[in-house]
Amino acid sequence: MQSPSADRLVLEEFRLFDGASHAEADLVLAAADPAGVPLLTSIDDERDVVSVRCVPGHAATEDDRLDRSTFGTLVSRWGPLRTYRPRIAESSLVPPTSYHLAVTESGINGSHPTPAAGDRGPHAPAPAPGDVRPVDLLWIGAPQGTHAGLLVVIGDGGSGGGADAAWPLSLGEALGVRIYRGTARA
């Protein structure tokens, strides 16, 4: 899944009706974006789901929104369409087997971020090979039109990551971070 030259990252959060099929909703999403990230589910409430897409520079902005009518009676509520300017939009040739997404509207995005205490500086030693887990997809974006917020998408491959791999679940709603996860389409 090679990321095209990214112009923007597009996020649409929505809520499924009670009893609506996640698999059916993902099939609708796959028809719109066959090679893209599958439908991701909130760790807090399985009815809250999200679509996140990397949109190439040549695509028209009016094509960003999903065709909501194709979801029929699966969706009870749509959130606003959010677009992000990519800071990083990288992926490997091998599609990930699992995905994690964290999104928030808090935190200020400055042009020259100051490293937090404990961050690796330019002269810090590289991590040991056993400490590094391969990431097959990494998208980081700052919201367009505001200086607050962040979107992070990570796709892990066959390195044993899986949808239940370690993730900072303690971030959650208390800090205003929404976390979603999912696995690749079969």
Image (cartoon, rainbow, N blue to C red):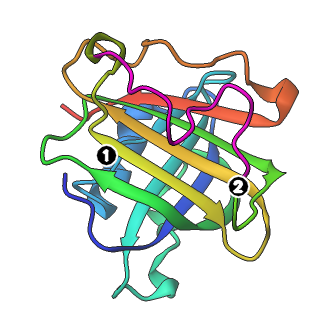
| Mark 1 Cα-neighbour bin, 10 Å: few <14, some 14–19, many ≥20 | some
Q: Secondary structure at mark 2?
A: loop
**Residue occupying image coordinates x 19% and y 46%:** 92
The image position of residue 28, as x and y in percent, is 36, 52
Which picture quadrant has residue 89? bottom left
Q: Residue furthest right?
A: 174
- In the image, is 152 to the left or to the right of 2? right
Magenta-colored stretch includes residue 116: yes
Residue that label 2 marks: 113
Relative height, residue 156 to residue 8 (above, below): above
- In the image, is 158 to the left or to the right of 114? left
**Residue occupying image coordinates x 22% and y 17%:** 159
**Residue occupying image coordinates x 39% and y 71%:** 55
Residue that label 1 marks: 27
Q: Amino acid at mark 1?
A: Leu
Judged by depth in the image, the label closer to the viewer, 1 or 2, is: 2
Mostly what secondary structure, the magenta segment? loop
Magenta-colored stretch includes residue 124: yes
What is the magenta range?
113-128
Q: Spatial distance from mark 1 to mark 2, Cα to Cα?
A: 39 Å
Q: Secondary structure at mark 1?
A: helix
Looking at this view, is 178 or 175 the one in front?
175
